[in-house]
Image: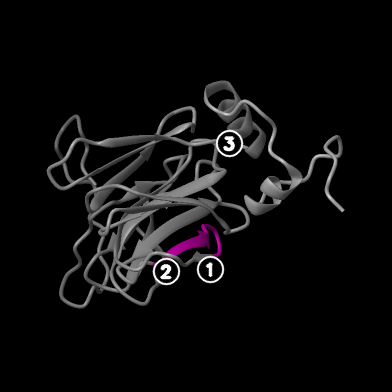
Amino acid sequence: MVDLATGEILFEFSKDFEGGCFFLRLSWSPDGRYFVTPCSNLPRADTWDAETGEHVKTLLHADGVNPAAWSPDGTRILTADLTGVVHVWNAESGDLLFDFRGHTSAVYDAAWSQNGNYIASGDDTGTVRIWDAKSGQEVNVYHVGFGILGVSWSPDSTQIITSGFYVIPDIRRVWQSTDELIAYAKACCVFRDLTPEERQQFGLPPRSDLPSKN
């Protein structure tokens, strides 16, 4: 840690990393008291006290860890490893809360939405997956034409931008609810209500004011 005014090294963070650790994406806790270091070449991520330099906890993984990010409310930590599994941890206890499994290759970045409701993760096949951050359920998936190195949410949590190898960044709209998506579809391209059968097909809740076929 360096004093920006003087350039003086205040203290160095150290831990036995078995010959060295490559850090790709570090993250501060929202209150600035802690930060987390994901180790890309070792199956671990570590949390540190930013004021004292003391090591706090080690989060063990099955393979090297690329991204790590603190949740906006400071209670959880997101990590993802080279096996493609996305993990959510209790920031205070270090307990694993749940895993997101769906990627078939290494995840190089993952990010919380600004409202803390969702997590987006991108892998090196160009697959983006969006997860409900509270239930752990996958809510959407789409593909871009490049391996993904960066994932970022817009400040209002309505858009995701991804970047990768030698391509123009890809921006997609993210719907915050089923009703919002339906309203948009009606405004732009759908000019009738979905039938009960169509709503069931797409996993939408039934409407009580629409007759169903018996």
Q: Amino acid at mark 3?
A: Gln
Q: Amino acid at mark 2?
A: Leu
Disc with the residue nearer the chain's start (2 vs 1): 2
Q: Nearer the viewer, residue 123 or 192?
A: 192
Q: Nearer the viewer, mark 2 or mark 1?
A: 1
Disc with the residue nearer the chain's start (2 vs 3): 2
Q: Amino acid at mark 1?
A: Leu
The residue tagged 3 is: 176
Q: Is residue 118 above or below residue 135?
A: above
**Residue 8 sits in quarter:** top left
Q: Is residue 1 above or below residue 187?
A: below
The residue tagged 2 is: 59
Q: Nearer the viewer, mark 2 or mark 3?
A: 3
Q: Residues within 10 Å of mark 2 (few under 14, many from 20)?
A: many
Q: Residue at x 67, y 29 (%)?
A: 192
Q: Residue at x 50, y 41 (%)?
A: 72
Identify the secondary structure beneath mark 1.
strand
Q: Which residues are magenta?
A: 85-97
> How far apart, in angstroms, are the residues tagged by discs 2 and 1?
8 Å
Asked whether residue 195 is drawn in magenta, I would say: no
Task: Say the numbered circle drawn on residue 96.
Answer: 1
Q: Residue at x 29, y 65 (%)?
A: 106
> Residue 68 location, x and y as percent?
37, 55
Q: Nearer the viewer, residue 195 or 73?
A: 195
Q: Residues within 10 Å of mark 3 (few under 14, many from 20)?
A: few
**Identity of the residue furthest to the front in this view:** 214
> Residue 154 location, x and y as percent?
41, 31
